[in-house]
Image (cartoon, rainbow, N blue to C red):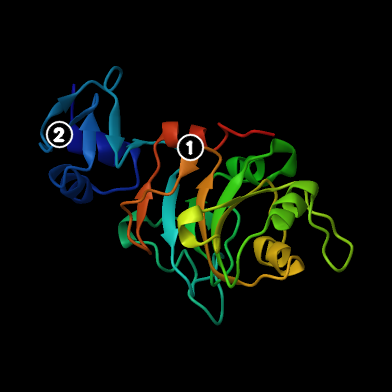
Amino acid sequence: MERLDKYIASRGTESRKEAQKLIKSGAVTVDGAVCKKPDAKVDPEQSTVLVNGQAVGEKYVYIMMNKPQGVVSATEDRRDKTVIDILPPDLRREGLFPAGRLDKDTEGLLIITNDGDLAHKMLSPKKHVEKRYEAELDGEITEDMIRSFKEGIVFADGVKCMPAKLETVPETGKTVGIVTICEGKFHQVKKMFAVCGRKVVHLKRISIGNLYLDGKMPIGSCKYLTNLEIQQVFMGNIH
């Protein structure tokens, strides 16, 4: 048997003192139950110890961010703050990057990780991982627009988008739509609506696959994702 604080410190990036703070804050679970005692004994071979939902000593981390406007999806930028810059200090570590991107003025669900393989799978058009956006427009959504999205919008330069789904939110007077796409061309959603004669006033990503933005998370906040939540990224796609 081994002390809980020693177990965490020996397998993670935290010092013994940092491990004790995490335990006392309620961020640590042992076999599914919160444990706030640094001197609690755990079995290194049998116990399942999680820190903020992440298994101790795991190579990769996955973070959900409710990205605010005005921040760029990059690891570094000379002019603007990046999503890495605004990560809380306790979540920072070497090698983190945003998996995919949201435009500077777009908010919502963004995954930050150090797992390049997951990012590649999530972004590959061949995997058909759907991304859903809530788009507020400067005019009503028409049946013709819904049909055009389904057939595949063609940009002015001849580039054709893959078929997408456009749904209205009736209680908004049809000026808010939910867009589902499975690719990520530059400014894609805004350009798709522009082809249809509409301007996007506000854009927010609400889901990736079956992983939805936590509605309780304030804009700019972050949290660790569990392995189950990461699996949901690749579940529930209709293509």
Q: Mark 2: which secondary structure?
A: loop
Would you say 5 lies left or right of 169 here?
left
- Label 1 crowd (10 A; few <14 / some 14-19 / many >=20): some
Would you say 12 lies left or right of 120 here?
left
Query: Horizontal and vertical percent for residue 54?
Result: 36, 38
Question: Image point 34% across, 42% down: which residue?
Answer: 12
Task: Tell me the amino acid under the disc marked 1.
Answer: Ile
Query: Horizontal and vertical percent for residue 186?
Result: 71, 64
Quarter of the image that includes the N terminus? top left
The residue at which mark 1 appears reads as: 230
Q: Quadrant location of residue 209? A: top right
Task: Tell me the amino acid under the disc marked 2.
Answer: Cys
Quarter of the image that includes the C terminus? top right
Asked if 35 appears above or below 123 in the picture, the reply is above
Instruction: Quote the CA–CA distance across marks 2 and 1.
Output: 24 Å
Mark closer to the chain start, 2 or 1 = 2
The residue at which mark 2 appears reads as: 35
Would you say 63 lies left or right of 7 here?
right
